[in-house]
Structure formats: structure tokens, C-alpha cells
Image (spheres, grey):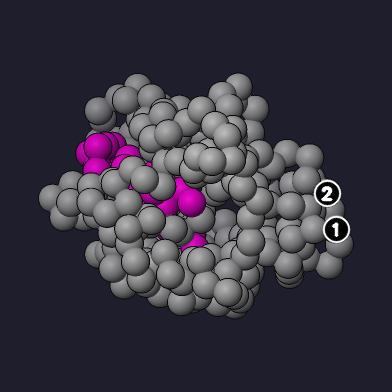
Amino acid sequence: MTSQYHFVLLHGGCFGAWAWFPIEARLQKAGHKVTAMDFAGAGIHPADANDITTFDEFHKPALDFFESLPENPEEKVVLVGHSMAGFALAQIMERFSHKISFAVFIAAVLSSSGVPLTNDTPLYAIMTSEDAPRSQLQFNNGVEKPPTSFYFPISTMKHMFFSEFDSEDMVVLASKLCRSYPIQVFSTALTYTKERYGQVPSVYIKYLNDNTFTPPAQDYVSSKSGPFKEIIEIEGGHFNHLKRPDEFVRLLESLAKKYIV
């Protein structure tokens, strides 16, 4: 019989807790506890992404949740983050390493410790290359000032996010529910250390056909932002876990069983 775990699921940029729906349903059916939450300005959270300037503000719902968790070794959680949630994983692991049993980074974005994304030259160069996906910028403080947020046009969603999906169902759903991402947070430097962040066992899942956070970018993060117990390569696009939720849940369960003492 599979052990029961508490999975905390953190969404990627422009998406929300809703994006975990097939995974959440299957984990709950298997008897696990699941917490999926929106970051500030994402999903149904009322904040406006254009007003958010730091990761502390953006990740506040998750930081508050971890602050409220009891400091009980028997109640440690499995932390799972996709794409832009790599920043949240690092921040949470650094502050609350004693409350996390294991972490899973899925095609996750993360700049070097102490370095804002825009200053992490190798990673930023990959992410802004000619082959990188193009987003739409918003300038709520005026076009003469730096952008305040970005979003992805509907016309790009199929290629970027759902290239593996046969139907347009996920594109239609995402077009209704996706929101802007607070681009100003990229000037924030997150510091994560071997003594705290590095004490949480973690793995990195690479999607080899990812059109959003490309394999070279994933290679950079997985090689620079460890230590990772394991780097798992999967033939799939940016939302492969939604395309194959049963396989993904089995993978999560097997990894938790393998790495949680």
C-alpha cells in the first residue's frame, strides 16, 4: 500500500492553482492530502499583477501557508513546483526547510542565488534568444517606464504550452483563466543556501520537448541550482504532466517513497 503524503502544488507563471486539477484529483483519490494555491494576482487571487514588485509579495499566499504549518516532523510536506514556481520553491525551501520532506522542480525557472533573473546573464540570454517564446508586455506606469507585467497571447498558447495535446480544450481553458505575471519581481534577488535550501532532498524534472522553458535553459538551472538527488528527463512539452496525469502521479508517489526517510 502506498504511503500517504501531503502534496503542496505551486503553479507556473500566468497560470493558477486551477492548472493542477487533473493531478490534484488523482492524488486525492489515492488518499493523499493536497494543497494547491494561487500566488498573488494569479488564479482567483484578487491582487493586480501590475502592482506586485517583489517575490515576497507575489509568493505571500504560499509563504503564509508555510508559516501556519505546525512544526511537526510527522507533518512535513512534499513541495512540487512547475516552471516559474522554481523561484517559490527556492524561497520556501530556504525559509521553511524544516517543514518540507522532499521537493520536485518541474521544468522550473530559477536564477543563481543572490542574482536577479535579469542579471543572470547566461540564463537570461537563453530565455530571451530569438527562439524563445514571445510574451506581451504591459506598461501600467507608462510606456516610458519599465514594464509591469506580461502575458501570453492566445495565439501562442498551443505551441508554447500544449503542443502535445490533440484538442484545443486546454487552450480554451487557459485563455479564460490565465492572468498576467508581475515582471517587476525579476529585479528581486533570492538567496538560497546549502545549509537550508540544500538540506531538502529534491529532484529536477526536465521536459525535453519544452517550447516554453527550453531544454538548454533547464540544463542551466538543473546544473547550477542543485544539489538535486536526481535529474529526470521526460520526452514531453511544458505541460506533459497534464497530458499524462496518471503517469505523473505514479512518478510523484515513487519519488516520495524513494527519498522521504
Q: Is residue 81 left or right of residue 198?
A: right
| Left or right: where 245 falls relative to 10 | right
Residue located farthest toward the front when viewing the structure as drawn: 144
Q: Is residue 6 visible?
A: no
Q: Is residue 29 left or right of residue 87?
A: right
Q: Residue at x 33, y 43 (%)?
A: 188
Q: Which mark is residue 172?
A: 2
Q: Amino acid at mark 1?
A: Glu
* Badge 2 element: helix
At horizontal 80% and vertical 58% (from top left) the residue drawn is 155
Q: Quadrant of residue 209?
A: bottom right
Residue 205, how many percent across, how many down? 46, 66
Q: Position of residue 119 (x, y in %)?
A: 32, 58
Secondary element under disc 1, as helix, strand or loop, is loop
Identity of the residue drawn at 40% across and 74% down: 219
The magenta-colored residue range is: 84-107
| Label placed on residue 245 | none
Q: Magenta includes 8?
A: no
Q: Position of residue 189 (x, y in %)?
A: 29, 46
Number of residues whose C-alpha sits closer than 10 Å to that of mark 2, classed few (under 14), some (14–19) or many (20 or more): few
